[in-house]
Image (tube, rainbow, N blue to C red):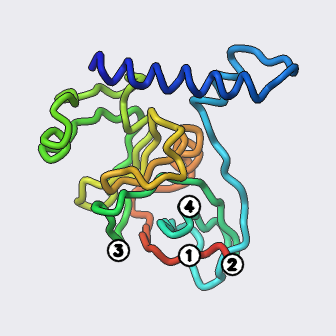
Amino acid sequence: MPFLFKLRSAVVVAALSVTIASLGSTSASAQDLFDFLWSGGSQSSVAFSPKYEPGQIIVSFGDRKLYHIHSRGEATSYPIAVPRQQSRWSGVTRISQKRVNPGWTPTPEMRRENPKLPAHVPGGHPLNPLGNRALYLGSSLYRIHGTDAPWTIGSAVSKGCIRMYNEDAAHLYARVNVGTKVTVTWKTFTSY
């Protein structure tokens, strides 16, 4: 755990340096910088193919976006981190559970790949990779969840899960139910 903390601390210092440099002479509080680095949140309403029923979720790894269809022809779009190449998948599933501040236990494969991972990280811990909300997908180990690493959003870095900014994960969580249909695809939808 100390190694992960030091690594994340170094990333935060680097991000703060870049942020402070980019602010130039404008005034900003430490809270503004903290909110910028940690909360994220950049959902927007977009036009979407009217062939999709309202209420469902479309995860486009190609767009690196999650779309929640809120009405015929319209969706809320959220930026996501997608699986790395060796962890890619697609299919149709449903939300099987919802959890606030879920605990995280790495799989044996994750621990083999990185023996320094902790055996478990409790829910609500600032270094919990699942962030503040998790939507479990079917009977798989995959989830749509927040993150403790907001700088990874937009990247191909996960081991199969769909990462969101914590603010976006909370926003989506409040709008979907257990049983919601989730289609995961590499198809792109940015032309709408």
> What is the CA distance from the residue labelled 4 to the residue labelled 1?
9 Å
Residue 43 in percent (x, y) is at 66, 51
Residue 88 figure quarter: bottom left
Residue 28 in percent (x, y) is at 79, 18
Q: Earlier in the sequence, mark 4 or mark 3?
A: 4
Labelled pair 2, 3 in contact (Cβ < 8 Å): no
Work out whether residue 9 or residue 164 is closer to the camera in this orientation and state it: 9
Q: Earlier in the sequence, mark 4 or mark 1?
A: 4
Mark 1 nearby-residue class (10 Å; few <14, some 14–19, many ≥20): some
Name the element at disc 2: loop
Vertical relation: 140 (above or below) 171: below
Numbered circle sitting on residue 188: 1
Residue 132 in percent (x, y) is at 45, 34
Q: How many marks?
A: 4
Outermost right residue: 25
Q: Name the residue beneath numbered marker 3.
A: 91
Work out whether residue 175 or residue 116 is closer to the camera in this orientation and state it: 116
> What is the CA distance from the residue labelled 1 to the residue labelled 3?
15 Å
Q: Name the residue beneath numbered marker 2.
A: 191
Labelled pair 4, 3 in contact (Cβ < 8 Å): no
Amino acid, disc 3: Gly
Q: Earlier in the sequence, mark 2 or mark 4?
A: 4
Q: Residue at x 30, y 32 (%)?
A: 103
Mark 4 nearby-residue class (10 Å; few <14, some 14–19, many ≥20): many
Labelled pair 1, 2 in contact (Cβ < 8 Å): yes
Q: Earlier in the sequence, mark 1 or mark 3?
A: 3
| Residue 136 visible to an observer of this rendering | no
Name the element at disc 3: strand
Q: Name the residue beneath numbered marker 4.
A: 65
> What is the CA distance from the residue labelled 4 to the residue labelled 3?
16 Å
> What is the CA distance from the residue labelled 2 to the residue labelled 3?
22 Å
> What is the CA distance from the residue labelled 2 to the residue labelled 4?
13 Å
